[in-house]
């Protein structure tokens, strides 16, 4: 316990997170430090702490409006000796035609708007390239019909955005490209592209199983790595983790058995299944403990219990934009 406290306060003592290999050979760490719902100064402080304690990957987005803070933390880390190839930087561009998102609101300019937003990512981060950039959500019509299709125009918008993504990738400005909140019908819109998405970031946490809506197995069949956001059960409208994860009987019992926290149990559940996860904290000690996932293992029985564990929530789908309800419906 003393060693863990010292590590959390002063130096990273835990092993570097293992990686998963994307379809093009890029190595993606299994754990990333996120900055969702942070302002720029909070993002700056959190990423600076995460790098200090040993995180090798970070996750941000253009529409988090805090990339200047992330970029400032990276600049400081590089000045202190961190090499660019020692940190995996993931960011996002907004999906098309969302009336609440002013940079991609016009459905007729998805391609050019995405081009501009990709360059804005690099500018705000102060980087010549990112390791991974993803489209944050499918085109907005999919929110209404829970699917992507030609009739609503969502497929055409998705293809326009993806064209800009592929060009960005081929220009060497991103080492990998992907999507977020995509269901199979939205992937189907991109079936003819010469560069298929490499990552799909979706909501996934303990209480949903390790293959909600069969999205993980679907991704594997297409060579797409599924990455988890809201790994502690956070919803888009709250800053708080799910109480059943933080203080529930199952996670508490497993945590006690291994002398770890319930947060570590929840993260271990995902990374043990080979699913990269995004977590966040403004507390250096918590960030350091998050990295202590590879010095211990869940037992076979605990893994089965976590797989069967379910949390009944009004909203707990892998995507807020489309779903398995219409996964196979492509018009």
Image (tube, rainbow, N blue to C red):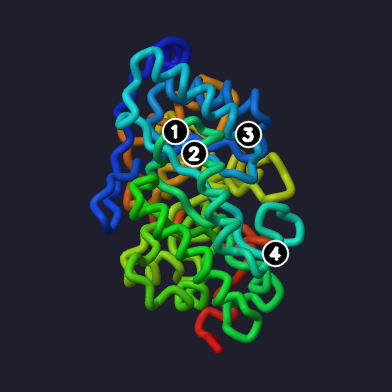
Q: CA distance from mark 3 to mark 1?
A: 15 Å
Whether the residues at callouts 4 and 2 have beta carbons within 8 Å, the answer is: no
Nearest the eye: 53 or 170? 170
Q: CA distance from mark 2 to mark 3?
A: 13 Å
Q: Which mark is residue 140?
A: none
Outermost residue to the bottom: 331
Among numbered discs 4 and 2, the one appearing first in the sequence: 4
Q: Residues within 10 Å of mark 4 (few under 14, many from 20)?
A: some
Q: Which residue is mark 1?
A: 127
Q: CA distance from mark 4 to mark 2?
A: 22 Å
Among numbered discs 3 and 1, the one appearing first in the sequence: 3
Q: CA distance from mark 4 to mark 3?
A: 23 Å
Q: Which mark is residue 66?
A: 3
Secondary structure type for disc 2:
helix
Q: Residues within 10 Å of mark 2 (few under 14, many from 20)?
A: some
Residue 166 screen position, x and y as percent: 40, 60
Task: Say left or right for 90 vs 15.
Answer: right
Q: CA distance from mark 1 to mark 4?
A: 28 Å
Outermost residue to the left: 25
Among numbered discs 1 and 2, the one appearing first in the sequence: 2
- Between circles 2 and 3, the one closer to the viewer is 2
Q: Residues within 10 Å of mark 1 (few under 14, many from 20)?
A: some
Q: Is residue 318 visible?
A: no
Q: Which residue is mark 2?
A: 122
| Quadrant where the image shows the N terminus | top left
């Amino acid at each position: 316990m003393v060693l863990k406290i010292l590590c959390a306060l002063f130096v990273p003592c835990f092993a570097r997170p293992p990686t998963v290999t994307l379809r093009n050979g890029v190595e993606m760490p299994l754990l990333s430090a996120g900055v969702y719902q942070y302002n720029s100064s909070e993002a700056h402080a959190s990423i600076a702490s995460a790098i200090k304690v040993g995180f090798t990957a970070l996750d941000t987005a253009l529409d988090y409006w805090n990339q200047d803070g992330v970029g400032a933390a990276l600049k400081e880390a590089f000045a202190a000796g961190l090499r660019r190839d020692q940190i995996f930087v993931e960011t996002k561009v907004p999906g098309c035609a969302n009336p609440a998102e002013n940079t991609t609101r016009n459905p007729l300019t998805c391609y050019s708007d995405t081009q501009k937003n990709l360059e804005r990512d690099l500018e705000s981060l102060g980087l010549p390239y990112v390791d991974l950039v993803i489209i944050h959500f499918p085109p907005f019509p999919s929110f209404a019909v829970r699917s992507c299709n030609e009739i609503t125009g969502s497929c055409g918008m998705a293809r326009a955005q993806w064209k800009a993504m592929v060009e960005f990738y081929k220009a060497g400005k991103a080492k990998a490209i992907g999507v977020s909140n995509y269901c199979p019908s939205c992937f189907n819109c991109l079936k003819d592209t010469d560069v298929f998405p490499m990552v799909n970031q979706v909501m996934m946490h303990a209480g949903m199983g390790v293959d909600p809506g069969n999205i993980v197995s679907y991704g594997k069949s297409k060579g797409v790595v599924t990455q988890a956001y809201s790994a502690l059960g956070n919803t888009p409208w709250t800053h708080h983790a799910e109480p059943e994860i933080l203080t529930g009987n199952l996670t508490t019992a497993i945590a006690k058995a291994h002398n770890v926290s319930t947060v570590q149990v929840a993260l271990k559940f995902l990374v043990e299944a080979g699913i990269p996860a995004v977590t966040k904290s403004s507390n250096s000690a918590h960030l350091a403990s998050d990295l202590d996932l590879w010095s211990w293992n869940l037992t076979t029985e605990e893994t089965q219990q976590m797989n069967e564990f379910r949390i009944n929530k009004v909203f707990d789908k892998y995507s807020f934009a489309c779903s398995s309800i219409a996964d196979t419906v492509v018009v």
